[in-house]
Image (cartoon, rainbow, N blue to C red):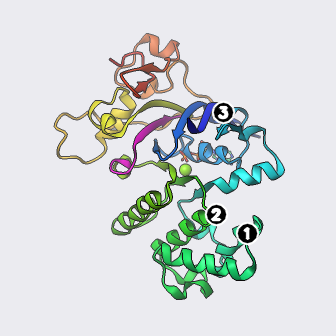
């Protein structure tokens, strides 16, 4: 059974300048223990999708089901309990860590909110968590600004894991870090996953980051999922021209034949192109692409793409 199931989810931002169709009819599944990557250019709707899953923004239509319960219909206590099970890690841990709070208070706050333990027990849980994510033992009484970028992301991870969630949505968790630090944080996430039997939705604009990490990759373009495939298969047999263009931008000496990297800007999500949303930038586009929205088609087990010309 799926841990998380998303059915035709749309999240639109309505403002003075019109409606931004940030997420526009997305369906996906995450199985227990699975790491699913969500990739696509900046602005395609990845963060909005991630936040919609935990109702940090409210979807406009569609459903999110976590362990058989409809998250989109939840309120109050029930929503709070599901938020304990689904945690988020953000790109910029500094922006999400209150500068006036010590690490102790940052880590024990979620425990207090959920009524876990007495103060002493909460302190002990926080101390254990600090050690677990590889922070110095004296971290608890220090403030976020006293830590490096990589250490702050360790604090973000500790805070996300302290409630023992089942699913963690990682929104570009290493994008702001130096390359050498990126590897350390990715390793930590892999370790945590194995130890705690977590599932991840791992959001990244960078395909090279997900290659050795994800079981399956979802490729998003302008509010839609355009391809879904097991990671290794995506690398060797991508079907969608957008996926191929993204892959062409990743340096890889083992790939001989290269597609042309993507050119042009992402069209406005205020007014997405007719038919296939990618047709304005697609080297294969023909009349049908301008007229008809392509259906998601299966290309073997667990591999699907939405393209009129995919074979
Ligand atoms: P990504 O994470 O892939 O970069 P986002 O989900 O942040 O994409 O953004 C998707 C689209 O929604 C973009 O056009 C962005 O400008 C717009 N957007 C994001 N957040 C808001 C908001 N709070 N209000 C209005 N528009 C937003
Ligand atoms: Mg984002």
Residue 292 visible, this angle = yes
Q: Earlier in the sequence, mark 2 or mark 1?
A: 1
Q: Residues within 10 Å of mark 2 (few under 14, many from 20)?
A: many
Q: Earlier in the sequence, mark 3 or mark 1?
A: 3
Give the distance between the C-alpha atoms of the residues marked 3 and 2, in whole angstroms.
29 Å
Q: Which residues are magenta?
A: 210-222
Tell me if residue 249 comes above or below residue 123 in the rendering.
Answer: above
Residue 220 in the magenta stretch? The answer is yes
Q: Which mark is residue 134?
A: none
Q: Is residue 195 left or right of residue 72?
A: left
Q: Are marks 3 and 2 in contact (CB under 8 Å)?
A: no
State the residue lying farthest toward the right.
76
Q: Is ligand 2 within 8 Å of the beta carbon of the residue shown at mark 1?
A: no
Q: Which mark is residue 116?
A: 1
User: Which quarter of the figure is the N terminus placed in?
Assistant: top right
From the viewer's perspective, is the residue at label 3 or at label 1 nearer?
1
From the viewer's perspective, is the residue at label 3 or at label 2 nearer?
2
Q: Are marks 2 and 1 in contact (CB under 8 Å)?
A: yes
Q: Which residue is mark 3?
A: 10
Please report the residue visible at 82 percent of the width from the left and 46 percent of the height from the top. 75
Element on which disc 3 rests: strand
Please report the residue visible at 76 percent of the width from the left and 49 percent of the height from the top. 79
Residue 254 % position (x, y): 17, 43
Q: Quadrant of residue 228?
A: top left
């Amino acid at each position: 059974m799926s841990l998380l199931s998303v059915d035709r989810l749309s999240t639109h931002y309505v403002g003075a300048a019109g409606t931004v169709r940030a997420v526009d009819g997305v369906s996906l599944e995450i199985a227990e223990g699975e790491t699913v990557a969500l990739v696509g250019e900046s602005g395609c709707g990845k963060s909005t999708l991630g936040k919609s899953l935990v109702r940090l923004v409210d979807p406009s239509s569609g459903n999110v089901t976590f362990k058989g319960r409809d998250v989109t219909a939840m309120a109050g206590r029930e929503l709070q309990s599901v938020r304990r099970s689904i945690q988020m890690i953000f790109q910029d841990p500094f922006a999400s860590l209150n500068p006036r709070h010590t690490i102790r208070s940052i880590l024990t706050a979620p425990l207090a909110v959920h009524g876990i333990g007495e103060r002493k027990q909460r302190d002990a849980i926080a101390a254990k968590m600090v050690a677990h994510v590889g922070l110095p033992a004296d971290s608890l009484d220090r403030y976020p600004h006293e830590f490096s970028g990589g250490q702050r992301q360790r604090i973000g991870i500790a805070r996300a894991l302290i409630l023992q969630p089942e699913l963690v949505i990682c929104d570009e968790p290493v994008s702001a870090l130096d390359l050498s630090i990126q590897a350390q944080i990715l390793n930590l996430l892999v370790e945590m996953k194995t130890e705690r039997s977590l599932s991840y939705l791992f959001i990244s604009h960078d395909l090279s980051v997900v290659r050795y990490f994800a079981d399956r990759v979802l490729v998003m373009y302008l509010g839609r999922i355009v391809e879904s495939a097991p990671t290794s298969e995506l690398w060797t047999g991508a079907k969608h021209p957008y996926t191929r263009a993204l892959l062409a931008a990743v340096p890889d000496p083992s790939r001989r034949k290269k597609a042309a990297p993507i050119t042009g800007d992402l069209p406005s999500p205020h007014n997405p192109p007719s038919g296939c949303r990618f047709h304005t930038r697609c080297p294969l586009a023909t009349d049908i692409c301008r007229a008809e929205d392509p259906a998601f088609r299966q290309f073997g087990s667990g591999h699907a793409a939405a393209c009129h010309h995919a074979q």
